[in-house]
Image: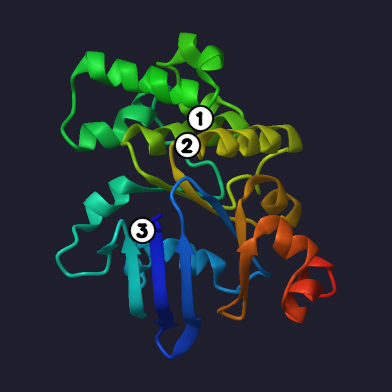
């Protein structure tokens, strides 16, 4: 099977600071891959390469290749807006817009010029069903999304990401601002979503990586130290540094 995402010899610099060092990895379709490692090890920087979020940083420079569906996403012909439709992003803190629940979800579609009410209604219902919150909010779609709880807001943000029909969903510590019950709900949701999407999640919570991911990549000081089947990596790491990290001896 062809990999969905392929990274080849990727190096990233912020000015003279070498933050990602020669990282190569493949991610298969409909797989959940977790990036773990101590703070500042490069995992979020690497995640943001996959939808070119680092482009906004003035001193950013990348070498190497990242292919999604066999297409080099850093090729000069690539339209970044199109890429970001295909590769959605969910952030650490829930960030609903100060609009109604309905308008949050159709925001990306309206930007694309889609205003057909019937279609928008169907997308709102479908994505809210997908994230398991439809029954909770169906009677208050025109109320502010800001009035919801943190866990509900994060699910609205995931629904907003799904509304534009991406094939890859990136999640940067999506539960770190949530309580344990909301966290469990989002983890269950990730498990459901992988039937339709390829998911890459950055998490500082190793138990979470163990619960939700098929494979785990351990980053340290900008290097990919080990990348393997999650169960294998946690029970039988090949590299001593991985062993030390997962047993809590540093990090």
Q: Earlier in the sequence, mark 1 or mark 2?
A: 1
Q: Earlier in the sequence, mark 1 or mark 3?
A: 3
Give the x, y percent position of residue 170.
47, 51
Q: Are marks 2 and 3 in contact (CB under 8 Å)?
A: no
Q: Is residue 27 left or right of residue 228?
A: left
Q: Earlier in the sequence, mark 2 or mark 3?
A: 3
- Compared with residue 128, is residue 40 higher up or lower down, i.e. above or below? below
Q: Are marks 1 and 2 in contact (CB under 8 Å)?
A: no
Give the x, y percent position of residue 116.
18, 19
Disc 1 is placed on an element classified as: helix
Q: Is residue 55 left or right of residue 209?
A: left
Quadrant of res 108? top left
Q: Which mark is residue 158?
A: 2
Residue of label 1: 146
Task: Give the CA separation, mark 1 to mark 2.
Answer: 15 Å
Picture residue at 72% right of the left edge, 38% below the top: 179
The residue lying toward the viewer, choosing from 3 and 139, is 3
Q: Would residue 218 be visible to someone looking at this image?
A: no
Q: Nearer the viewer, mark 1 or mark 2?
A: 2
Picture residue at 39% right of the left edge, 66% below the top: 6
Give the x, y percent position of residue 191.
59, 37
């Amino acid at each position: 099977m062809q990999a969905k995402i392929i990274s080849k010899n990727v190096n990233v610099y912020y000015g003279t600071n070498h933050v990602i060092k020669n990282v190569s990895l493949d991610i298969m379709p409909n797989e959940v891959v977790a990036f773990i490692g101590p703070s500042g090890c490069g995992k979020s920087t690497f995640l943001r390469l996959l939808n070119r979020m680092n482009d906004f940083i003035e001193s950013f420079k990348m070498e190497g290749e990242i292919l999604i569906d066999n297409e080099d996403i850093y090729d000069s012909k690539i339209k970044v807006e199109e890429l970001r439709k295909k590769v959605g992003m969910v952030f650490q803190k829930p960030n609903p817009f100060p609009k109604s629940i309905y308008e949050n979800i159709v925001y990306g579609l309206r930007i694309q010029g889609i205003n057909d009410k019937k279609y928008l209604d169907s997308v709102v219902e479908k994505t809210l069903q997908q994230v398991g919150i439809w029954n909770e909010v169906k009677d208050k779609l025109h109320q502010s999304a800001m009035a919801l709880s943190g866990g509900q807001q994060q699910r609205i943000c995931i629904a907003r990401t799904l509304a534009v029909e991406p094939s890859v969903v990136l999640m940067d510590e999506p539960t770190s601002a949530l309580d344990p019950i909301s966290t469990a709900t989002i983890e269950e949701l990730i498990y459901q979503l992988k039937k339709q999407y390829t998911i890459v999640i950055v998490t500082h919570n190793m138990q979470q990586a163990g619960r939700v991911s098929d494979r785990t990549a351990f980053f340290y000081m900008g290097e990919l130290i080990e990348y393997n089947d999650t169960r294998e990596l946690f029970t039988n790491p090949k590299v001593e540094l991985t062993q030390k990290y997962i047993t809590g001896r540093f990090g």
